[in-house]
Image (cartoon, rainbow, N blue to C red):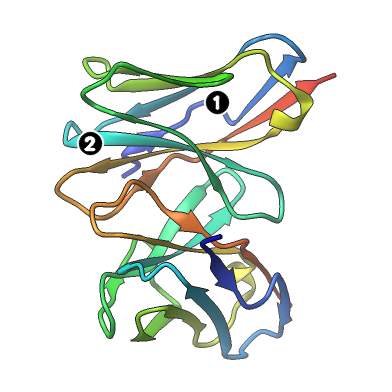
Amino acid sequence: DQQVKQNSPSLSVQEGRISILNCDYTNSMFDYFLWYKKYPAEGPTFLISISSIKDKNEDGRFTVFLNKSAKHLSLHIVPSQPGDSAVYFCAASAHTGNQFYFGTGTSLTVIP
Amino acid sequence: DVKVTQSSRYLVKRTGEKVFLECVQDMDHENMFWYRQDPGLGLRLIYFSYDVKMKEKGDIPEGYSVSREKKERFSLILESASTNQTSMYLCASSTPKGSGYTFGSGTRLTVV
C-alpha cells in the first residue's frame, strides 16, 4: 500500500512561471518530509526538507508547504528554470523509524 | 565530499546469470538501502540494513539477496537474473534517525 502518493506523473511549466508539485501521505505518524530531485542516469539529490513542527520552509527559489490536517505537502519553484527539468520525489518518515517512504515521482519539464 | 559509490553505471547481463551490484559509502553510516526505480512506480525498496551482517526485506525482495560483511559495503545479488529485473538500481545510506539519504549515482542494469 502506497503511503506516499504523487498523483501527477508529469508537469510542464513555462520558464519564469511557478511550478507546484504535490504530494499526499496517509500515515499520521510521518513527521519529517523531504523532496529529492533526480536527473536521468543519476542518483536522487536532496533538495529541501520540512519537519512537522513547521508549515513552511524556504530555500532560495524552493519552498515546501506542509498541511498536516490534510496530510498534504507541496513544493513550489519560482521562478522555474530549464535546469529544473527533472523527476521530483517526495519522501516521508516517522521519528520512530529509520526508513523513508517515497512517492512515485513527478516529471517536471520547464519550457524555455 | 561525502560519497556513496556504486561500482558500475551500466551493466548488461544474460538471463540466468548471477549478478552482483556493489555499493560503498565513506560516511560511516549505519543504514544502507537498495532501491530500484521504474517508470511510473517510483523508488521501491528491495532490502535494507541497519548494521553489519544485518538485513531486512523491503517491499520487493523476491529474486534478490544482500550481503553486508563490512559497515561501508552493501551488496545486492540477483541470484538468477531475469528480464523483469531490468531497471535502475539505487543504493543509499543514512545515519539512524537521520535527516535523509545520500544516494549513489545508480546502476542501469539490462538483462537480455
Task: Residue at the far front: name it.
Answer: B1
Location of residue B106 in the rendering, given as x and y in whole percent from the top left corner: 61, 63
Location of residue B80 in the rendering, given as x and y in whole percent from the top left corner: 54, 87
Quick one: A89 or B81, which is closer to the camera? A89
Q: What residue appears at the point 67 percent right and 76 percent down from the top-left corner?
A: B8
Provide the residue designation for mark 2.
A30
Tell me the CA gap for discs 2 and 1: 21 Å
A68 lies above or below B9:
above
Task: Residue at the far right: name it.
Answer: A112
Residue type (three-letter) at the residue carrying disc 2: Phe
**What is the secondary structure assignment of the residue under circle 1?**
loop
Provide the residue designation for mark 1.
A8
Residue type (three-letter) at the residue carrying disc 1: Ser
B106 lies above or below B111:
above
Q: What residue appears at the point 59 percent right and 31 percent down from the top-left corner?
A: A9
Which label number is shown at residue A101? none
Dots 2 and 1 on the same chain: yes
Indicate left or right for A41 with A38 as reference: right
